[in-house]
Amino acid sequence: MCEARSSMTRDLLCIGAVLWDIIGRTGSRMRVGSDVPGRISRLPGGVAMNIAMAAQPFGLRPVLLTAVGRDPEGDELVTACEALGMEVGHVHRSESHPTDRYMAIEGENGLIAAIADAHSLEAAGARILTPLVDGTLGSPEAPYTGPVALDGNLTLALLEEIAAHPAFAEADLRVAPASPGKAERLRPFLHHHRAVLYVNLEEAGLLCGRLFTSAPEAAAALIAGGARRVLVTDGSAAAADGCARREGILSAAPPPVTVARITGAGDTFMAAHVAAELDGADRATALEAALRAAARYVSGESPV
């Protein structure tokens, strides 16, 4: 079956990027070279952090496994995460690398450009997984059995290690690329027996090496290529849920909304979907719930 079993475990391990998001937003349409008025914000971000923040309203307790520099920006970030209700006791603090940052520019016509500086996370490597192998949260002999959100900011080598590691053998793995540029890092999970992939239409195309015109088409191709379970989104167009163990591809359209922001929408979709399935929702109900949550986020109605 593809539905997650309802669980008394409300911890969600969020493994990946936790950094400072520096986002410039304007209501104007932009092109290369545009210089327009707008607002610039600096907030805790990163895929793992965004999923963690989005998960809290659904009754999940986020546990962060990441790397943060032991510098003033890192101290401020850890304090901010703790104040937001995240479990930060397992965060690896790097002595040799500064705290990571992500910078993006968004216009009325969408994301214009972004740069992710995740060198601290990449350098930390498997050290961020220590609590899952030393018995604190789990071990190879007693694997963690709850939901785990992985993001593609981890290196390909570390993702390959996680895919094969016995400490993750019983986990409910939910995997998302950090961006289209890192989509191919998800290849170790294309044939994984416990992984659920969350991708957008472009990322699905990169994983399959072809272009798709719709999310249902992309989901079908990923399943045919060996994936166990995939969720494919396509902005305001229909999203799809594909499962190798059940016939057919489910699809549903998101509610129409006025777009107020973009960065973090996919993370909200993923968190809402995980929470719905842990509460026992079937595939169709979970997909609809995730689309509604993402629409509220994009409209600016949701605070996360």
Image: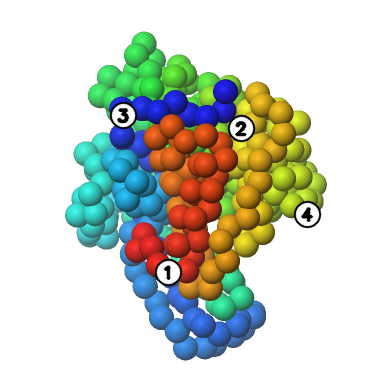
Instruction: Locate residue 51 relative to residue 177 in the image: left or right.
Output: left
Give the mark nearer the N terminus: 1 vs 2. 2
Element under label 3?
loop
Q: Amino acid at mark 2?
A: Arg
Q: Residues within 10 Å of mark 4 (few under 14, many from 20)?
A: few
- 159 or 71: which is nearer to us? 159
* Residue matched to label 3: 9
Instruction: Locate residue 260 relative to residue 131 in the image: left or right.
Output: right
Q: Amino acid at mark 4?
A: Thr
* Residue matched to label 2: 229
Q: Amino acid at mark 1?
A: Gly
**Could one spot residue 63 in this view of the protein?**
yes
Quarter of the figure with the C terminus:
bottom left
Q: Residues within 10 Å of mark 2 (few under 14, many from 20)?
A: many
Could you tell me which residue is drawn at 32 percent across and 21 percent down? Answer: 138
Disc 1 to disc 2: CB gap under 8 Å:
no
Q: Amino acid at mark 3?
A: Thr
Q: Position of residue 203 (x, y in %)?
A: 66, 49
Disc 4 to disc 3: CB gap under 8 Å:
no
Disc 1 to disc 4: CB gap under 8 Å:
no
CA distance separating discs 3 and 1 = 30 Å
* Residue matched to label 1: 300
- 11 or 155: which is nearer to us? 11
CA distance separating discs 4 and 2 = 20 Å
CA distance separating discs 4 and 3 = 38 Å
**Residue 115 vertical placement versus 60 (above, below):** below
